[in-house]
Amino acid sequence: MQLYNTLGRQKEEFIPVRPGKVHMYVCGITAYDYCHIGHARSALVFDALVRHLRHLGLEVSFVRNFTDVDDKIINRANSEGRDWREVAQTYIDAFHEDMDRLGVLRADSEPRATEYIPQIQDLCAKLIDEGKAYATPSGDVYFRVRSYPPYGKLSGRSLDELLSGARVAPGEEKEDPLDFALWKAAKPGEPSWDSPWGKGRPGWHIECSAMSDPYLPLDIHGGGQDLIFPHHENEIAQSEAVCRCELARYWVHNGFVQVNAEKMSKSLGNFKTIRDILESYLPETLRFFLLGKHYRSPIDFTAEGMDESEKAQHRVYSSLLEARKALERASWKKTPLPAELREEWAALPTAFEAALDDDLNTAQALGQIFSQVRIVNRLLEEKSLRAAEGTRELLEEFLARARDWDAQLGLFGRDPAEFLSELRAMRVARKNLDMDHVENLLRQRREARMQKDFARSDALREELLGLGVNVRDTPEGQDWDLE
């Protein structure tokens, strides 16, 4: 497998530090609000990566942390008159609810920053002892950036470039504007812990160094592209200055999410939480949409894009449903399938795997799924091939392959009839259709066909079409869906 390594700025062959085992650490949420679509993308990217690595037979130890003490958590607690621990727990619980709905596998370990206060203090003390950090008279502890010569290797930024934008705020006791906080002296009304430097709390970056330390060296360290600098750059400096080892062999970062071609922000009014989106779309539709583009590329969230995702899902699930129905046939003919079709069909699983092996190209992998759907639909539509024994074998393989898509991508694993019914109900609700009226028209059309009044039946079909309802007649009877 090839993975793009941010550190090397190129795709590299993935070779675990320990043969057959993978230690993977991904930065999780700061628990002060509901998760937005950017959180969903990061979670789904690394979920797909874990799934694929396990499919390859690797033993994956997946760690995703929670930051449960932070300025934003404290500010929210103060504004709502709540305890900061209660705020953090509220949004950790909400994270689990949202991710469970999206089919994101739970991490093997989910450490919280506040569980690692002794380890954080120990790291700070070691850095001070080695001259890599210093305590100030007021009780802050800072990392000496210039004491770590490779600083900037992940982000590609030079110290001169960083210095031009750095400053020392009034009241700070930094030796150098580049230095960053490892430990923050307590302020009135904030949570704090006793330490050798007085009461205080950890800085953001040191938390992840402490939580990832038991798993070093990591095979993969991941997160959103926005974490490359300063968070991951600072993690490297802190951890490697102490462990004298490589913090992580591969650094994997997912791209940004925009909303209608604009950066998502509360000030623009385009802030999309997962819960907002799932009021109008099924969870698997959001999952499909976010996996439909390569993880390193930016993605633009739009209603049109989600609608297209629904149509694509409908096509796959409809084929799975029709394949199941076709397999109920009692007898099959010995008609051979075209050789070129059988060859193309046999090659597609390999192409699917190759796409995921090529830097987790989920977009290309989905393309291979649709190539299989196209072949299945052709077999189901062509009278000369529909009842062929080779078609039966191919349809059985199709359903088996769908189980693999579900295992690796978390897609197309639902019961097709159940999913299509839920999808139709969601689209009906979004269009605000009067279902009593629609059901009445459908009933009238059934009666017209029973009475062989085909002119009336056709007129009712057109009336339903005007409402966006497409009716088709099947061997099982009248069926309908939205256009």
Image: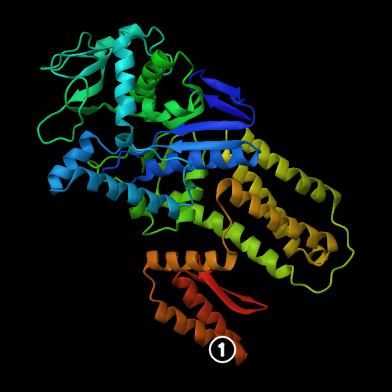
Of residues 55 and 346, the one drawn nearer to the viewer in this rendering: 55
Query: In the rendered view, would you say 339 is above or below 428?
Result: above
Q: How far across and how far down the image is residue 287, in percent?
A: 48, 49
Of residues 219 and 2, the one drawn nearer to the viewer in this rendering: 219
Q: How many marks?
A: 1
Q: How far across and how far down the image is residue 391, in percent?
A: 79, 61
In the image, taking residue 223 as reference, residue 351 lies left or right, namely right
What residue is rendered at 32% in x and 34% in y?
113
What's under tag 1, amino acid-wise?
Ala
Q: How far across and how far down the image is residue 389, in percent?
A: 84, 63
What residue is rendered at 43% in x and 16% in y?
243
Query: In the rendered view, would you say 204 is above or below 441?
Result: above
* Res. 254 visible in picture: no
Res. 12 image quadrant: top right
Q: Which residue is mark 1?
A: 448
The residue carrying pointer 1 sits among few (fewer than 14), some (14 to 19) or many (20 or more) residues within 10 Å by Cα, namely some
Considering every residue shown, the one lying at the far right of the view is 334
| Secondary element type, mark 1 | helix
Quadrant where the N terminus sits is: top right
Q: How far across and how far down the image is residue 325, in percent?
A: 69, 70
